[in-house]
Amino acid sequence: MRGHRALVGFIFLLLIVNLSSSVSIAQSVKEYDGPGIDIIVPNEHNVFLHGTEENPELNREWPILTGIPLGSASFSKTSSTLSQSLITIDSVPLSEAVSFNGTVNVNLFASLEAKSPLCRQTNVIPGTPAGATTTFFVSLSWGGFSLIDSVATDSVTMEESYTNAHQFMVSVPDVNVSLGPGDVFSLSIDVRHDCVQSGVLWWGTFDARSGITLVGDLLDPKLEHAIDSNRMLRIEFTPISPWNSEDFSSQIIEVVGPMDDWSSMAHGFGQEDQRLEHFESPHSFRIGDANRTVRTWSTEKPLNPGLYMIDACFTLSDQNPSEPCDVVAVLRFEVPEGKDALLSGTWVAVIIPLGVIAWLGFSMKEAMLPLPAYAVILVLAIASVGPAIHLPDIDSNQPRIDGAAPSFALLEHGGDGSVSLSELLSESDAVIVGLYVPGSPNAARQASNFWMTDELIDNDITFVQIATGEGVRAVDLDSHSEFLNGSWPLLMDNSDSSVGQAFPSRASDAVIIIDAGGFVTDWAPGSLSSTEIAQAVEKASKGSGHSVIDPIALLWGTALLPIFVLAMPRERRYEEPEEILVPGAGVLLTLLGAGVGFALWATPISLMSAVGLGSMWIWVEVGLCVLLVYHGVRTLLNGRIPEIDWLAGKVHSKLPEAYRNWRIESSFSDDVHLGMWVAWLTWLRTPDMVAQGVGSVARTSVFGVIMAIAILFGLIIASGLCVTIARTIIGVTGPLPRTLGSLSVGIRPRAWGLASAMLGSWLLISLLVGPVLGSM
């Protein structure tokens, strides 16, 4: 019974101890509620004896050899009052200023030349001529400050060999010194050895680490991160040590996330699928504050919004190499969602149909139309959402997507003046721009890929790299300029990074492919491989991926939805021609009218791009926005565009009489108007389709001119087919569309005029607030 009670009591006691231990551990775990950094550095720092007796040295490398020590200093029996000088040595100089407040220990390992009990047996009266002890006397100064002045170690009666050397130590607490670059340790070691058997001071092996140990704060490493506008992560590590950056001999850095919360961020935590990146050797280096060397890494892919940590493990040259981590750093950070624009493009998709409906309500006060006509306008208002959802946001410094590259003239590092985009384009069929932030490892990546690309393809292309970022300085380009050795121009962005901000990538690491017309063909954050660059250049020479069937492809999306409503015929009944016409005459007339309308818009755009106006294309697009607003306003007021009506009449008058009699001028003008609206809607959806697909191709070569003309004719035919297909789909649905078309023939184009004017106004404001003001 007593044994049972004793067992229960023992178990109860274990539970209490375990519970208290768990509470203690739980209280010691840090709870994080936000971003920040924790760095754990060792409190002991070592300077070891190395070399030989003839050439001893003091450095920071932890001895890793085993067996017979490489370094030794022998000594024999000395006088009981005199000592023998063994070593006087200086350490490597400091490279950083440092203030040290702590304890200084000097550890020495010594033994007899061979294991023997002789010293113990003859140690009659320790410390006298009749004794057989060994005592070391240590003097140590640091930067002129005397830390230890002939302080004696403990006296030891030695009897072991080097395999089990005796340890001697001198410790000086409360040392407070301030040192500067160039200061050194000066170590002097004397010995008084009373034994007749010779002894040896050992160093340079794992088991005999004679040297100096500093207990206190000496290291101040910095781990920082930066996230660019493309959510690419750059990591920078500044290894700050009083000696040099090589104290941090290696590192393992992992990017972990997205994680559920801040509290789960600790060294070694995170699931395998959350470990996105693993870095060891630095991708690049840069010179930071106080001329320090900064190690840099960069992710290859953008990070998704969420919570992340950088889990870093560093090894130090003066620490035990059997330990995996000497310095542990955990940097917690958040990748935010994209910054909200001043006005999201979603608003225009709401404003336009509401505006059309409001206008419809006001028009009802003047005269009432049949209710089906108002239903058609409601459908048109809803259809106008299709092109509206593709309009850009209104935001300051917003770059123009799917447009021309920003025109620039920037200073060349090491050159005589500036280099402009126009100059670069005049010498080649494509320009490859490497945009980078100083110190980014992507600068070297881009350069390596550019060199390989130059060997891979025969196209006449030009390379250039631009250092961007707020406050970029000429000195920031020095190291990369030496790396390039004049391979291509290295340019420096303006201090406000206005050129970098105007690219689709913003002022961040990216490679941008610019075609012969000055339009952005392709781009990617970070860098592009040589194969990807070669493919993009090849694509640029053939219209940058644009095709003559692009308008037809857009017809099956949302961009051309209004065309189906606008294509409703004005006649209530289909009239057969009185004379025999060629088969498919109606289709041919529609193709002709719509093609003329599209050509009126596309031909000037192609010519302006072909003659090299890409450098000022943003102003061309501003003019196009004004023209779209004008067309919308004239259609709103008159139901027609007078200039289009006049030109349609001229073309109609050239048709054979039989065709003119069957397809009256107003119906033919409707087709021309529809072709013009197809041009406007395709431009809103793909702004560079004609400029790149036609104009840029024409600038590549003589064959390119012929190819560009063929592409332009193909686009004209495709736009005519769009109108033809839309009219056919409307026609096969029965007599209802004809009835609705005839009832709404007057109000339908006017409602669309209002919608198109609003589309043009939104895009105009977006261009003025974004690219235009951003370039000033």
Image (cartoon, rainbow, N blue to C red):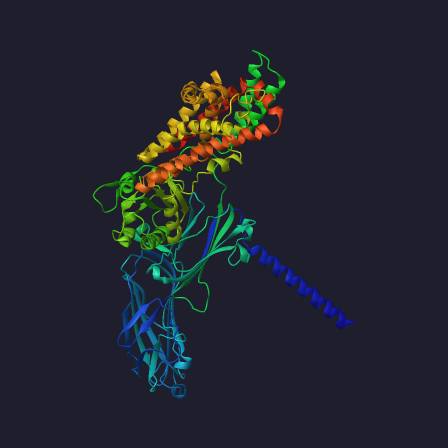
Q: Which quadrant is home to the C terminus?
A: top left
Q: 484 left or right of 329?
A: left
Numbered label tally:
0
**Residue placed farthest to the left in the image?**
416
466 or 736, which is in the foreground?
Answer: 736
Image spot of residue 391 (x, y percent): 47, 32
500 or 284, which is in the foreground?
Answer: 500
Image spot of residue 631 (x, y percent): 44, 22
**Residue placed farthest to the front in the image?**
580
In percent of the image, x 43 and y 68: which residue is there? 321
Q: Which quadrant is home to the N terminus?
A: bottom right
Image spot of residue 535 (x, y percent): 39, 49
147 or 359, which is in the foreground?
Answer: 359
Query: Is residue 762 visible in the rendered structure shown here?
Result: no
**Residue placed farthest to the top in the image?**
366
Query: Is residue 8 visible in the rendered structure shown here?
Result: yes
Image spot of residue 184 (x, y percent): 28, 63
Q: 86 left or right of 654?
A: left
- Residue 84 occupies which quadrant of the picture? bottom left
